[in-house]
Image: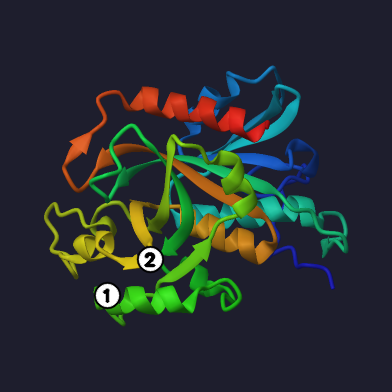
Amino acid sequence: MSIKHSELILNPDGSVYHLNLRPEHIANDIIFVGDQDRVDKITKHFDSIDFTTQKREFKTTTGSYKNKRFSVMSTGIGPDNIDIVMNELDALVNIDLNTRKPKENLTTLNIVRIGTSGSLQADIPVDSFVISSHGLDLNGMLHSYQIDEISNSDIENAFVKHTNWSDKKASPIIISNSKKLEDKLSSDKSFSGITATAGGFYGPQGRILRLALQDDDLNHKIDSFDFNNHRITNLEMETSAIYGLSKLLGHNACSINAIIANRTNGTFSENPGKVVADLIEYTLEKLIQ
């Protein structure tokens, strides 16, 4: 049965609705960034550019770096945007946009997120890199899908107990990365740990301006959690959504973050732009190996 026009929306030129892309516009190896301005900071290293477009906060450039084809895409901020990006990317490779039917032979994309984040552990300093071994979903977006096959109940239950997690909030979900991509990105320069993904920047990440928090001790509970030597290293707003939807759709995903702040000791990088630039070059070189 064909997917209804109201469910898979296409633009008049046949491109998917939000991303403004057609299948020929994207590579199988994709780099996600949050900030649209960071797309050019990556693609300036490319040997050639084949295509670029932007609609809203979603900017995509496809080209080649040392004979390997990549697409670099800005997702904007938050798990809701990741829901749009992941579903439309998958539609580009795994749904025939003419017949509006899923393809029999599915394509697996390799997705690496280059992000910035704050460390929750005193021994992970600013200006370091953290690879997300898992995404800890604290925002609830993934509960719109059938997630039993991707969740890890033992560690989820331990986290709920450790934090005395409110039953008024969405249940936390733990999703692992693609070990294939993690192996490519790892080195003695990188740390590894669980990345918690919140649904907002202020209250959901424990920041207090004028509003009181539901649990003002939650950040301490998060950074003190340990399960079989798995600890939560950093907090941001996209990784668990990328991991969860990638697992469900059959894609590989791994997130690597430049640590520009340490929430434990209150420090901030003196040159965050350089840390991000170093991470970009590091990641590109790792991905062509």
Task: Decide if residue 119 is on the left or right side of residue 137.
Answer: left
Q: Quadrant of the C terminus?
A: top right
Quick check: 240 above or below 20?
below
Q: Which residue is mark 1?
A: 162
Q: Residue at x 68, y 62 (%)?
A: 249
Image coordinates of residue 130 in percent, x first then y, are 42, 43
Quick check: 46 above or below 77?
above
Q: In terms of secondary structure, where does tag 1 sit?
A: helix
Which badge, 1 or 2, comes first in the chain's sequence?
2
- Residue 199 visible within the image: no
Task: Decide if residue 102 is on the left or right side of residue 280.
Answer: right
Q: Quadrant of the N terminus?
A: bottom right
Quick one: 123 or 131, which is closer to the camera? 123
Q: Which residue is mark 2?
A: 138
> Which amino acid type is shown beneath numbered disc 1?
His
> Which amino acid type is shown beneath numbered disc 2?
Leu
* Residue count near mark 2 (Cα–Cα under 10 Å), binned few <14, some 14–19, many ≥20: many
Q: Residue at x 51, y 64 (%)?
A: 175
Image coordinates of residue 21 in percent, x first then y, are 70, 41
Q: Residue at x 57, y 79 (%)?
A: 148
Q: CA distance from mark 1 to mark 2?
A: 14 Å
Residue 16, numbered circle: none
Q: In terms of secondary structure, where does tag 2 sit?
A: loop
Image coordinates of residue 117 in percent, x first then y, are 35, 43
Task: Decide if residue 66 is on the left or right side of residue 154.
Answer: right
- Residue 89 visible within the image: yes
Tell which residue pokes out farthest to the bottom in this image: 167
